[in-house]
Image: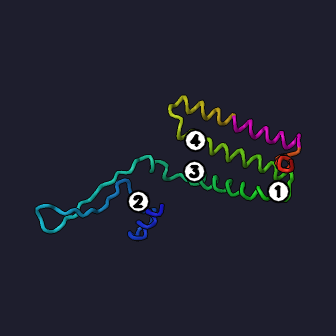
Amino acid sequence: MATIVRLSSVCRRGVKPLFYQSTLLARPLVVPYKYQEQPYQLTARIHSSQALHAGSGSKAASLHWTGERVVSILLLALGPAAYFSPSPFVDYSLAAALTLHGHWGIGQVLTDYVHGDAKIKMANAGLFLLSTVTFAGLCYFNYNDVGICKAIALLWSK
């Protein structure tokens, strides 16, 4: 990433035009020619894939990325809140945030390592079932037992 920022500061074009301006990017390259005294300029053509530009009108990926960051920051804030003021609101917020964070994380692992249409469908169905059971189990634990905050405090006290 540092290379991209440094390249954009040298080119004075910014990061966005460098990657998203067109599907065909050209970059000058100076190569000395054996039989001439002066070097001449070649152009290296870099073809970017069409998949990068397929959903360029949609902001779903950007919103998903932002949502993942918000949930991660929310989990960082819920840690001290659960310690200093345990309450049912914090318990259910932890249940929702932990389940969503785990669902998105395992979903990324499945995206990277599961290939084939049938396998992907089965893995996503299993992930959805696992996330649903996890959230239901945490809510059941919060409602019928001491709750997540007090359970962790009890584990630390022994």
Q: Magenta residues, as a range?
A: 130-145
Horizontal side, residue 138 vs residue 29: left or right: right
Horizontal side, residue 12 vs residue 60: left or right: left
The quadrant in which residue 139 appears is: top right
Q: How many marks?
A: 4
* Amino acid carrying mark 4 in the image: Val
| Upstream in sequence: badge 3 or badge 2 | 2
The residue under label 3 is: 60
Whether residue 108 is situated above or below residue 75 in the rendered picture: above
| Upstream in sequence: badge 2 or badge 1 | 2
Asked if the stretch drawn in magenta spans residue 143, the answer is yes
Circle 2 or circle 4, nearest the eye: 4
**Residue 78, image x and y in percent?**
76, 56
* Amino acid carrying mark 2 in the image: Gln
In this rendered view, identify the residue nearer to me: 62 or 95: 95
In this rendered view, identify the residue nearer to me: 103 or 155: 155
* Amino acid carrying mark 3 in the image: Ala
In this rendered view, identify the residue nearer to me: 27 or 22: 27
Residue beneath the point at 86% across and 53% down: 87
